[in-house]
Image (cartoon, rainbow, N blue to C red):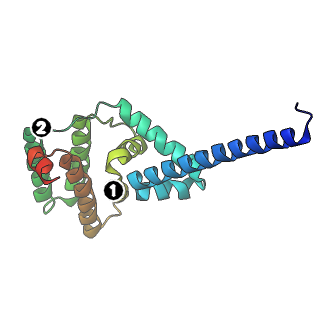
Amino acid sequence: MLTDPMTLLALIAGIAIVLAVIVLMARRRKQQRSAALRDHFGPEYDRLVDEHGDRTRAERELMARRKRYDQLQIKLLSPEQCERFSASWAEVQQRFVDDPRGAVHDANALVKEVMKERGYETGSFDQRVADLSVEHANVIDHYRAARTLAQASERGEASTEDLRQAMVHYRALFHDLLRAYDPHPILREARA
């Protein structure tokens, strides 16, 4: 029966169609995954694609970040914790007038303290950035910029304006970390 040329041709055509459908479905699934990662990670997605020079490698790293993040015990802050941290931030900002370098150092320490309280590991800077990028991708560039300016400050190479910019960058991350607490979830649900 398989020796009949028409039957053989029909079988080959059927297999080719099935393979084409499988390839198209796989390609579509990859495009959807890429779009989802791009939407979720925003500029961090593009930065990693540029850094790696390869979309597949960048996406693998982002998926690994998400997997690692899922292993962390990230929690929301209580209203009391938010108030305490906000008061600490206000003190750090007030200190800036008299001691800009010290205030930048304290801002970095306070950001790390909030991260630790939320359940993030506070080891290496690169790991902190990777972990934060999963839920705070919109402010990761602020964190990188703050660190660069803080390091310049430690070397004595930062102007007062540089230190002010570092504070602005740290504040963006700080507020985003606190923003994860929604004090009015019922109102938010009612608006939805």
- Disc with the residue nearer the chain's start (2 vs 1): 2
Q: Position of residue 98 (x, y in %)?
A: 13, 61
Is label 2 in contact with label 1 (beta carbons under 8 Å)? no
Q: Quick one: SS at disc 2?
A: loop
Quadrant of the rendering where the N terminus is positioned: top right
Write the residue at 40% across / 52% down: 41
Write the residue at 84% across / 39% down: 7
Residue that mark 2 sits on? 78
Residue that mark 1 sits on? 138
Classify 66 as above or below 146: above
Q: Position of residue 171 (x, y in %)?
A: 22, 56
* Residue 154 shows up from this direction: no
Classify 49 as above or below 8: below
Q: In which quarter of the view is residue 130 placed?
A: top left
Q: Position of residue 4 (x, y in %)?
A: 91, 37
Q: Is residue 168 left or right of residue 135?
A: left
